[in-house]
Image (cartoon, rainbow, N blue to C red):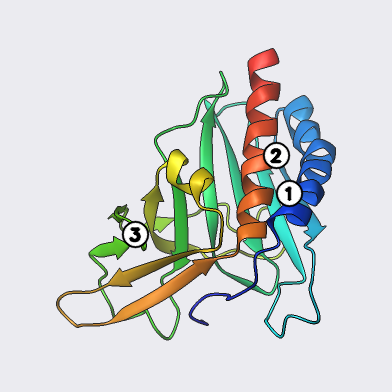
């Protein structure tokens, strides 16, 4: 796994694209009340910047009629080893915080036990290992087992640029930095807000 994606700030264009994308994709899964819907949105690129920009963002909505929650997952299509995930109650409220998830079966992290996570401004709560029984429900498989960190809503929304998160394993000394692209965050948050609004109106 690469140590994140380093990109220039393209928040304004990314936000506009994200709004259009979320409006188009958020509601079908809520109407259907069952199953998984996956959409891909192109992210803005800047060929003159000299930095790597992901081609697109994938958003997966999971809305099962038997579940009290609707789940939202977002990642870049060029690297599904990490991304953002949220669970919303049926009243549209967020369950705890947002979660940055990272594939446990990467060459960097397979033998490491990460017990701390840090952003440039604050520490995050490490969530430990989670297993996803529906990792392949939307088509191309996502990581079946991940570790991660909880990111408070206000932190994710207030960060104007990309957000780097450093995971550290005190016993082995291993560390990795996962950088969330600002445009990916925008797509994710706009989808969360759209789904939340749709749930509140029901």
Q: Are marks 2 and 1 in contact (CB under 8 Å)?
A: no
Q: Quadrant of residue 10?
A: bottom right
Q: Position of residue 71 (x, y in %)?
A: 58, 40
Residue 4 appears anywhere in the view: yes
121 with respect to 58 (left or right): left
Circle 3 residues within 10 Å: few <14, some 14–19, many ≥20: some
Q: CA distance from mark 3 to mark 1?
A: 31 Å
Q: Identify the residue position indicated by label 3 in the image.
A: 129
The residue carrying mark 1 is: 15
Q: Is residue 127 left or right of residue 191?
A: left
Q: For this rendering, which residue is in front, 120 or 74?
A: 120
x then y, percent, for residue 187: 69, 50
Mark 2 = which residue?
35
Residue 121: image tag? none
- In primary-sequence order, the first of circles 3 and 1 is 1
Disc nearer the start of the sequence (2/3)? 2
Which residue is at 68% across, 41% downward?
190
Q: Quadrant of residue 9?
A: bottom right
């Amino acid at each position: 796994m690469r140590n994140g994606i380093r990109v220039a700030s393209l928040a304004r264009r990314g936000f506009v694209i994200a709004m259009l994308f979320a409006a188009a994709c958020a509601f079908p899964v809520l109407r259907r009340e069952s199953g998984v819907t996956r959409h891909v949105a192109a992210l803005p690129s800047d060929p003159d910047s000299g930095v790597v920009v992901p081609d697109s963002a994938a958003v997966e909505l999971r809305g099962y009629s038997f579940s009290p929650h609707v789940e939202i997952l977002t990642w870049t299509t060029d690297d599904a080893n990490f991304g953002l995930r949220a669970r919303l109650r049926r009243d549209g409220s967020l369950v705890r915080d947002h979660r940055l998830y990272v594939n446990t079966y990467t060459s960097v992290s397979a033998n490491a036990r990460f017990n701390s996570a840090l952003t440039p401004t604050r520490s995050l709560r490490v969530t430990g290992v989670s297993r996803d029984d529906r990792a392949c429900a939307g088509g191309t498989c996502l990581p079946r087992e991940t570790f991660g960190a909880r990111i408070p809503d206000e932190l994710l929304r207030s960060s104007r640029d990309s957000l780097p998160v450093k995971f550290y394993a005190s016993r082995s000394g291993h560390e990795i930095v996962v950088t969330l692209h600002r445009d990916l965050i925008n797509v994710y948050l706009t989808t969360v807000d759209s789904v939340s609004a749709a749930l509140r109106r029901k």
